[in-house]
Image (cartoon, coloured by chain):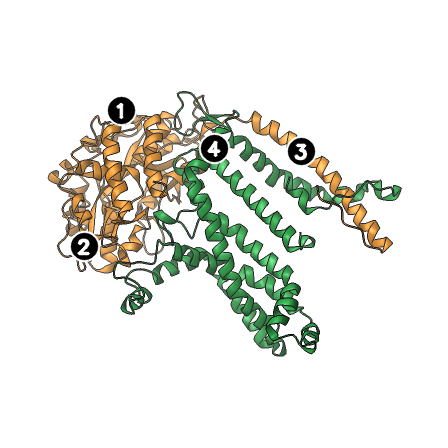
Amino acid sequence: MMKSKPLPADPMIRQLIRQAQNAQMGRRTLLAGAGAGATALALAACSSGAAVKPTAAADTSATDKIIRWDNWALYVDVDDAGNYPTLDAFKAQTGISVKYTEAVDDNNSYYGKVKDQLALGQDIGADAVCLTDWMVSRMIRFGYTQELDHANIPNLANLLPSLQDVDFDPGRAMSVPWQGGFAGLAWNKEKYPQGLTSVEDLWAPELKGRVGVLSEMRDTMGLIMLDQGVDISGTWGEEEFTAAIDEFKKQVSDGQIRNIKGNSYKEDLANEDTLAAIVWSGDIVQLNAENGDKWGFVVPEKGGTLWNDNFVVPIGSPGKKNVEELINYYYDPAVAAEVAAYVNYITPVVGAKEAMLAIDPTLAEDPLIFPDEATLANAYVFRGLDGTEEQTFNAQFQAILLGAA
Amino acid sequence: MAFAAFSSQAAPSTDPVARRRSPVALFLLLPGILYLVLFFLTPLVSLLLTSFQAPREFGDIGQFDYAFRWQNYVEVVTTYWPHIARSFGYALAATFFALLISYPLAYFIGVKARRWPLLQSLMLVLVIAPFFISFLLRTLAWKQLFSDESFVVQSLKALSLLGPEAHVTGTAFSVIFGLTYNFIPFMTLPLYTTLERLDLRYLEAGNDLYASPFHVFRKVTIPLSMPGIVAGTLLTFIPAAGDYINASRDFLGGTGTQMMGNVIEANFLVLQNFPAAAALSIILMTVILVIVSIYVKRSGTEDLL
């Protein structure tokens, strides 16, 4: 406690100061009381991460003909006027209107926004969300998703056979793929004409400090592990992961790898900070369209990763049946082709390639949108991790990203 | 608490009128108090409680229970001490450079340009003008200007000021540069408001007493502009220490330049390690509070607070 300052001589000012000081005392006692109240409130609320799984909301699809769909940017067809042609056609066909929002910027930050409501079983303001495999896996584990009624989705028969059974969602009871893509290697064809064929090529001395990798653990680590001969879909464990982490750490601390980024890696390729990088296939199609075929893309010879973003119905949504109708609509090959022609990612719908021939034959031949058998055979899905693995592997990966090696 | 350092505690008053509490004053304070309780105190208490949480036994990612696990603090300090040190180091450097740039600027606008009011207001507008564009966009623009193939970096390399393999983005330089750049207006404006009121007759008096211009500046101008300096440095240092945009890998930083804000973000969003993120936030707040209260006491400007 510091010594009190002498008060000014003016009696009026003295009076004012005293009054202010007394009011301050009052505020302090009041705050103390309020603090106790807040403590009780906070304690009464549940701890982080509920122990009990929430229950699904009652379905009001029959009366509320609306779907609130949260999705990633540039992930559905848009025309020049800003309308969504396939969604408009869906409304004309079924009478269900769709409020489409580009609300997902990143799996983690989206999850961070909605997780507390999900844990309480509340409506998060979305009836359908498209999130990546591993995040869907976590949400299913926690019971944050609703079980889909396949009887309402007859077109689900068009789902690619390789995606019908995934380890995080056997039989696709809770999730249905929306679009997918590869993580592979890209290089600047002008500045690095020799190109790349394997992850090992990224460690070439000429590329020192000009290599970028993705901040998505499963893609960067997946590619390095595949390069080290690990089948990432199979039964690998801590040992294999640590071996790949060591390699990754070495390349970062040697300054070979310069950038580790999410979506913004595209800017680095464009301004040539990075000349070679681990990238997502669909982005390179778009970048090449904007900048004139400047980058090459390859799935590494020892294998690339394949991921999907999947529809899930959050536990608190009252519109599950409407969403099932929406999924059924997008699993019509003709509609799937219309979307694929715009977004340039891999569609999970069988027959879309044939439908695409009618829209744009050159796109139908693009191996990044409609990969051939050989490419698909060389693409692996990172196996599902349990809670403990997710924590320890993420911690090891983030430690390198934060430079606390 | 450090709060106490800011308020001079009155000795028990003997004046009976002053001791009586005015209900009107309390009533008028009510909205402010409610606001503080709801949006400051409740989150703060919740943050404090979270920082002591323990992982749930056999729990999944992001599952914690209330406990008194003080080891959280030991763990984050031993793991992240480089980031803590870096945060305050960068913030201090940025504050220093911002002051170095802003003081002459504010002096020119507030003192030298007094004769030309139009110029004065024009320059003030120029200082504020960057606020019309989101600072995210401005920071991204700097990232482009500092990119490897940019004119700036290529010229520096041609002049051999930079090695052939050197780069600017992702270095301590670019992060401190970004922090300095982004906080210059926050430094300039408080400095301007005090310098604008600077009574030039004091400087004349100093000259008349045979003080050199440097002496006058050091003994008269600086002490008179101290409130502006303190306000400006606080407005720069506090947000700079917690900043996570400039140092972010997506902006001007790299893996070697991550600050506390980035660590908190990674722990909160990616690792779902809420206790660690909360403990780091509490540490950040406490250290800032201690530094600021010492600074304010030392500079003799308690009246500002």
The nearer-to-camera label among 1 and 2 is 2
Q: How far apart are marks 3 and 2 (CA)?
A: 63 Å
Q: How far apart are marks 1 and 2 (CA)?
A: 45 Å
* A246 or B130, nearer to the observer: A246
Q: Quadrant of residue A221?
A: top left
Q: Which mark is residue A206?
A: 2
Q: In the rendering, at what x and y percent does residue B121 appear?
A: 58, 72
- The answer to whether residue A173 shows anywhere in this view is yes
Do circles 4 and 1 both sit on a common chain? no
Q: In the rendering, at what x and y percent does residue A216 appear?
A: 31, 41
Above or below, B263 relative to A6 = above
Q: In the rendering, at what x and y percent does residue A45 appear?
A: 55, 27
Give the chain ID for the orange colour: A
Residue at mark 2: chain: A
Residue at mark 1: chain: A
Q: Which of marks 3 and 2 is nearer the N terminus?
A: 3
The nearer-to-camera label among 3 and 2 is 2
Badge 3 is on which residue?
Answer: A34
Colour used to depict chain B in the structure image: green
For badge 1, the amino acid type reads: Pro
Badge 4 is on which residue?
Answer: B74
Q: Which mark is residue B242?
A: none
For badge 4, the amino acid type reads: Val
Badge 1 is on which residue?
Answer: A170
Helix or strand or loop: what does disc 3 sit on?
Answer: helix
Q: Tell me the quarter of the image containing the C terminus of chain A.
A: top left
The nearer-to-camera label among 2 and 4 is 4
Q: Quadrant of residue A133?
A: top left
Q: Quadrant of residue B272?
A: top left
Q: Which residue corresponds to the image point at 30% horizontal and 63% vertical from the top-left?
A: B162
Q: Residues within 10 Å of mark 4 (few under 14, many from 20)?
A: few
